[in-house]
Amino acid sequence: MNENRVRPEDVRYPLGKTFAWGMQHVLTMYGGIIAPPLIIGSAAGLSATDIGLLITAALFVSGVATLLQSLGLPGFGARLPLVQGVSFASVSTLVGIASGSGGLPVVAGAIIGSALFGLLIAPFFAHVIRFFPPLVTGTVITVIGLSLMPVAARWAMGGNAKAPDWGSPQNIGLAALTLALVLLLSKVARGGLKRLAVLVAMALGTLLAAAVGKADFSGIMSGDLFALPGVLSFGLPQFDLAAILSMVLIVLVLLTETTAGLVAIGEIVGTPVDEKRIARGLRADMLTSALSPLFNSFPQSAFAQNIGLVAMTGIKSRFVVAAGGVILILLGLLPVLGRVIAAIPMPVLGGAGVVLFGTVAASGIRTLAKVDYKDNMNLVIVATAIAFGTIPVVMPGFYDRFPGWVQTLLHSGISAACLVSVLLNALFNPLPKRLSVADRG
């Protein structure tokens, strides 16, 4: 390899394009990032104002975490185009803790304690990279895309199952129209407009929604225009051992998911991801998770939907993702900007999500095409791992009667597919001493 060649993730673009593409990342993950604080805040019995504080805190902390992951500091950050946000994997456990007598202070203590444990083991956990050949990475990337499809479907149906228009032809039609705009622009647009196909399609979809009364901008100017993030707004952390131990298992899941995300984005970008880079990425993940409760937020992890945006647009620069991180910080400091993005109708997000998340699955299938299936168990390994990964998607209550630790490990299709594919590959195939994306060619 030519040492002077600029790696794809280090390419720089003009400032205007960088922030426009960064906005696409924010729009892609916005619905996912505000859902966990909304759910956890409701479980803790918070008022609408306090839940709003949790949401702006999530945006601010996720922006800082994204900057650390994409730009990096010595020893921290993978320096890859990876967007960080509040992890959904922790929601069910945190809801259980938040609904108890300790409330959010015990939640904060559990997150800090478990994340510090994760920070301690991150360098050792990074050695699992040799267990991620194309057989495993392709399976995991495919399942990442498949597991995100229900999110796109819920957005397309309206986002709120209790709303009277949930699943209405109007909502799904608006999603289909947005999808059609994405496809049309991807086909006929040229240059910068082609790269902005998702953003332009969402803007046009929002305007069409407003024309038929499906978008509401009335609340944009209500509330503060600027607000600094609060510090320990719900009290000092309380360190309950049982709560911390319950979150330690979640941290192991987060480390697994982030490792899978780092390998996936390395595969898509076409850049080496070795043990040192994995370790830096995991340290950044755990450091921001440990600090997030100080600013009223929750554990951080890589957002899979943004991996799909990188794959679809071909914009592999980490500086574009860093621009998205700056926008997230501004949204956390300027609630009015957050209300503007929140006004985008869910069906519009759903239409864009279908092609974005489908692109992730397609990228996984492309990686699986590199695997040798002749005279070995590889086809059975892929089939079994994908099946385990899609069980939580097609039957969410499948593990409800199992012990809590089993539910935690397998309820996430991504972690289930990752664990099964790694174990079966280790069982049926010889493992190399060291493996990186560069070694895979």
Image: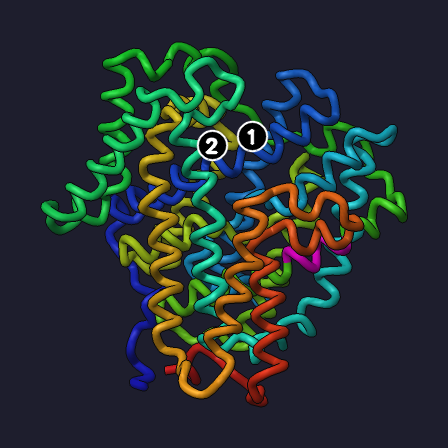
For marks 2 and 1 on the same chain, the one whose residue lies earlier in the sequence: 1
Can you identify the residue that label 2 sits on?
331
Vertical comparison of 92 with 371: above or below: above
- The image shows residue 192 at horizontal and vertical percentages of 17, 48
Q: Quadrant of the N terminus?
A: bottom left
> Magenta stretch containing residue 250, yes or no?
yes
Quarter containing the C terminus: bottom left
Query: Mark 2 and 1 residues: CB-CB less than 8 Å, in contact?
Result: yes
Q: Residue at x 33, y 54 (%)?
A: 359
**Amino acid type, callout 1:** Thr
Q: In whole angstroms, how far apart are the C-alphas of marks 2 and 1?
A: 7 Å
Residue 56: which numbered mark, if any?
1
Q: Residue at x 84, y 30 (%)?
A: 100
Considering only vertical position in the picture, is 406 above or below 236? below
Q: Which span of residues is magenta-colored?
A: 248-254
Is 21 displayed left or right of 409 in the figure? left
Mark 2 neighbour density, 10 Å: few (under 14) some (14–19) many (20 or more): many
Instruction: Name the amino acid, label 2.
Output: Leu
Q: Looking at this view, is 172 or 340 the one in front?
A: 172
- Examine the structure image and report whether residue 166 is included in the region drawn in magenta: no
The residue at the point 59 percent across, 72 percent down is 422
* Few, some or many residues within 10 Å of mark 1 (<14, 14–19, 20+): many
Tell me which corner region of the image, top left, top right, bottom left or bottom right, holds residue 280.
Answer: bottom right
Q: Position of residue 227 (x, y in %)?
A: 55, 24
Q: Main secondary structure of the magenta part?
A: helix
Residue lying at 49% horizontally and 69% vertically, measured from the top left: 382
Can you see residue 161? yes
From the viewer's side, name the closer residue of 146 and 82.
146
User: Coloured how?
Assistant: rainbow
Q: Secondary structure at mark 2?
A: helix
